[in-house]
Amino acid sequence: MKFKQVALLLTLLVPNSGIAQSKNHDALTAPGVSFESYLVRWWGAPGSKRMRPIYRISRFDTDALQLHYGIVPGRDLADYTMPYNPIRSFLSFVDPPAELAQQVNILYSDTAGAHSIGFTPRSGVEMVSQNNQLLVKIRNRTIAMPEDVTIKRGVDNEESNPLSLEEVLALRKGSSNVPVLCTVTNSGDKDLSDVAVVLTFEQSFCWSHFGIAENDVYTELNSPKSGSARAFYAWSVGMERGYSFTAAEGMELTYQLFPEMNRWQVKLRCTVGDFPKGASKNFKFELRAHRSIPERVENPVVLNNLSNMSFTRFQPASFKTSPIEPEKRVCIIDQIANLDRPKVRGMNLCTGFPQVFKDIETLREWGCNLFITGLGDPDQTADLIRHGHELGIEMLLAGHGSYMEGLPKFDAFYARPRTPEQLPDAIGQDEDHYYWDAIAPVRSFEAENGKSLGQATHDEMVTYWAKCFSDKWKNIQQSQKQYNADAGIWFYAPFPGVAHVDPLDRYDLFLRTISGDIGDNLTVFPFYYGIEYNQIEYIVSKWKAAGAARVVFLPMREFLTLPSQYIRAITAARRGGADGTCGFNFAVGDAPPEMEWMWKAVILGAWANFPEPEFGAFCILEEPAELVEILSMPDLVLRVVSEAADLNEKEHLARLQETLSHVRNNSKQPTADALTILITKDFAAKKDAGLQILWKSNRGILQMSSRTVRLAGASANALKNAFNLLLRFADLARDENRLSRGENQSEH
């Protein structure tokens, strides 16, 4: 499929000039080869303690084959194919639904001994158009060419690798073959020995046919098998896709077929040996994508020495955001109209006993109605669950053990009998991975589908692994029925992954299968810890569309740097259709005073976006973070106007000024920059049925329009509740003002 022909802005680095300029990429692509390049935000916000690198993505499409080049600064090229875990840089050859990623291993010896390193990409991609083909060059980071100034934060610019590896790939319209020229150079200041470069390609599951050739004709192979050859192919009858490799100048090809999960592997090796400083060596191969089983080896197109070609280096300069569907958004008025629908305002703390007993009471005062506890001391945990239930809080329990170790363990908790009040409402674990990584293949594909793995379609592969995933959780629930027959199940999940990064996206099928298999007992906590708010809306809406019973967004402490960022994240989750939000790994009573804003931002964001009838006051703001941002403005001018005779203007202004120490002055006369706080018993939303119900039930209402914050209520008590809600926003605005000025922010 063609990429969208949009005019993306790139930073173009002109060779030998050191001058950066903006240029439309279309001017440099070869006819018929589509190209797009962009940045994607991962986790964190600038200045946060836990900032993650920014993805740099380049994609090419010849109409017959796609080339995906993804750079995660500081991370080597790896076998980044489904299930896309762990997160690494990648160079992938994609003919959907087939994909293949290149891995690189560079070997050498020096006076310090033998070394084995990967390919750490240098940022950017270099290109030149020649004879109706697009030549694409990628480079690794070396002593001679470390990462440049385009990436400063969070990436170590010190390089010890003395071997430069350049790879040039030729792309042509309508062509599914990619001639490749690699050049390895000793860029260090010492002679090296035992130098070799090994390129590895591997895949598994739905591959049915394999063949090798020494001359021009392929001979079919059966697994298990290994050896060397001039050419190798792998074919999938289920996907109707395949790949072949032909070794050319300077390359040796070896292959191995494994009986487990139909796995196959190809290695292309260039053996250099002794390598004086400054020396270079070329090696070549060709990769082809196929849509039928190849019978003969095509003569490879060999790229000649390109040292005289003038490549132009590109850096992506604009961010690509996650896809959303604005017409399906859940607005705050929708939440008010469905006030009786249960919603989650939850928290998980990093606090131990006995402090957590006090903290859960504080959280309840702020509207918290769900709490996730780990399995620490079993008896204290049981008492905490009982105490939470007495407060009216739903209590979830995380078992012992990592997802990498298998099922969570609850034996210690149930080692002695527990009263009904001490039993958790649901049990779960952190599934901190993507798709089916670390999930055991517990089902028989052959028995269920009547054919071998090699005959599987891509849909059948995804469905198989999704069923293995849901089997794990159904088994967990079944194993606990003897102790707690009514307990539900839950898990944290970072998937769907960040949009526009992975070469393939099969999350719709994967999530739909899991949600359908597990059913009404599931609560999933999808998480994304960054400021690409569309990504939050995207992942929540994906789970909701898949039919998950309850979807609760999970923000984490220290990834964001401002209260408004947490509130915007939670608002994005609400727009995606979330059933609530739950903070992860926060501190309340143990938090230093300058960090208390973190948990408050999460729980106030939950209050504002996920209201329920129990509230005394409601925030009717589509974007409640805007109230924090306005109240945090330097030299803010406040003007309080009370139309309610029983509420004093001066008293309320004084309380706001006490909280908002950065307020410059106040004025009874309107000014252009003044923020008016209007306190009124006048009901202004007579046509809104939901707000009418709130008004008649004596609830306070907080609204904002332009430069006026409106606190409304039918009684003095309702107005008091609305004002107290405003004070909580003001409390966060004070921190927003302080943090925006750089006070107590972490250095990065």
Image (spheres, rainbow, N blue to C red):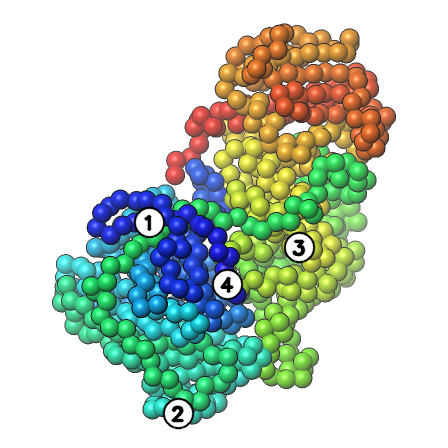
Mark 2 is surrounded, within 10 Å at the Cα level, by few (under 14), some (14 to 19) or many (20 or more) other residues, namely: some
Disc sitting over residue 2 in the figure: 4
Marks 1 and 3, how far apart at CA: 39 Å
Query: On the image, numbered disc 1 is attached to which residue?
Result: 12
Which three-letter amino acid code belongs to the residue tagged 3? Trp
Q: Which dot, 1 or 3, sits closer to the camera?
A: 1
Toward the viewer: 594 or 362?
594
Toward the viewer: 424 or 615?
615
Report x, y in % for residue 611. 74, 36
Query: On the image, numbered disc 3 is attached to which residue?
Result: 543
| CB atoms of marks 1 and 3 within 8 Å | no
Which three-letter amino acid code belongs to the residue tagged 2? Val
Q: Residue at x 64, y 70 (%)?
A: 463
Marks 4 and 3, how far apart at CA: 28 Å
Marks 2 and 1, how far apart at CA: 45 Å
Marks 4 and 2, how far apart at CA: 33 Å
Which three-letter amino acid code belongs to the residue tagged 1? Leu
Q: Which dot, 4 or 2, sits closer to the camera?
A: 4
| CB atoms of marks 2 and 1 within 8 Å | no
Disc sitting over residue 217 in the figure: 2
Q: Earlier in the sequence, mark 4 or mark 1?
A: 4
Mark 1 is surrounded, within 10 Å at the Cα level, by few (under 14), some (14 to 19) or many (20 or more) other residues, namely: many
